[in-house]
Each structure stands twice: as C-alpha cells, then as structure tokens.
Image: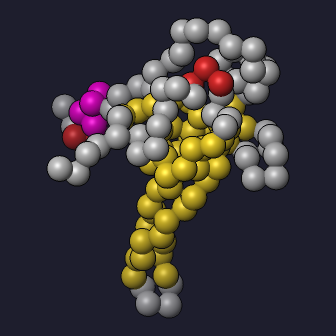
Amino acid sequence: MTEKVRNKQKEKKPELVETGCNDKNCHVHGNLKTRGRTFKGKVIRKFHKRITIEFERMIYIRKYERYAKSRTKIHARLPVCMEDKINVGDLVKIQECRPLSKIIHFAVLGKIKDKEDGK
C-alpha cells in the first residue's frame, strides 16, 4: 500500500452525536446544510454555541521564492448537542456553511482527537 492510502486509513473519523437537540442550526439534528471547504484545527477558545479554531498553513512568497508559515483563526458554530464533548485544546473538523452571523461561516462536524498534554 502507498503511504497516502495508509494515512487515510489511520485518520480518525469525527464522532457523530447520538442524542437529539432542538437546535435549528445543527448539521445533524437541524436544517443546517454544510458544503464547501473543510478544515481541521485546534480549539483555542470556547464560547456558548461558538468556538475558535487555529491551524497553520504554508504560504508561498513569490518575491523571495520561499514558503512562510501562517496561522489562520476561524470561528465555527458549536451545536448544543456537542458543547459538553468539545473542550479547549481538542482537534476538531469544521466545514463551511451559509453565513450564520457576521463572523461565523463554518459549523463543527465533530471531534477528531482529545487534548494532548505536553508532559
């Protein structure tokens, strides 16, 4: 098997929530449709019905013909049914949806990995 295929098999799927919720902006139990771009990132802040994730990406700088690391922060809608499962430091998967507010254009699909302690 090629290395790319092995990495896909090792990648953990996001957990789907079993309990129902009355949230109309929930992609599992409500009417929110997700489409477009998908990102994985670390939760850096948690609010009521919203989280902020951060991830690094490489940007090519044409002038210097080099790559630079850049951090991106994205706000995502956190459904009520997932609020107790996702905490600061967890690795989560989010996907684009319709604009829900001025800053929220993504919805949380699920948790990929728990917080890692650096001990």
Can you say whether 19 is above or below 77 in the image? Answer: above
Task: Please tell me in which quadrant of the rendered image residue 24 appears.
Answer: top right
Extreme residue toward the top, this view:
19
Residue depicted at x 47% and y 75%: 60
Q: How many numbered discs sit on the rendered protein?
A: 0
Percent coordinates x, y for residue 45 in the rendering: 54, 50
Asked whether residue 7 is drawn in magenta, I would say yes
**Would residue 60 be visible to someone looking at this image?**
yes
* Segment colored magenta: 5-10
**Which quadrant of the rendered structure holds the N terminus?**
top left
User: Looking at the image, which is closer to me, 91 or 66?
Assistant: 91
In the shown orientation, is residue 32 left or right of residue 18? right
Q: Where is residue 103 in the image (x, y as percent from the top left)?
A: 75, 53
- Residue 5 visible to the viewer: no
Residue 56 percent coordinates (x, y): 44, 61
Is 41 on the left or on the right of 51, as rendered? left
Q: Is residue 105 magenta?
A: no
Residue found 29% across the figure and 43% down from its top: 116
Coloring scheme of the render? secondary structure
Is 4 above or below relative to 45? Answer: above
Residue drawn where x is 40% and y is 76% of the image:
67
Front-most of residues 67 and 76: 76
Position of residue 113 relative to residue 116, above or below, is: above
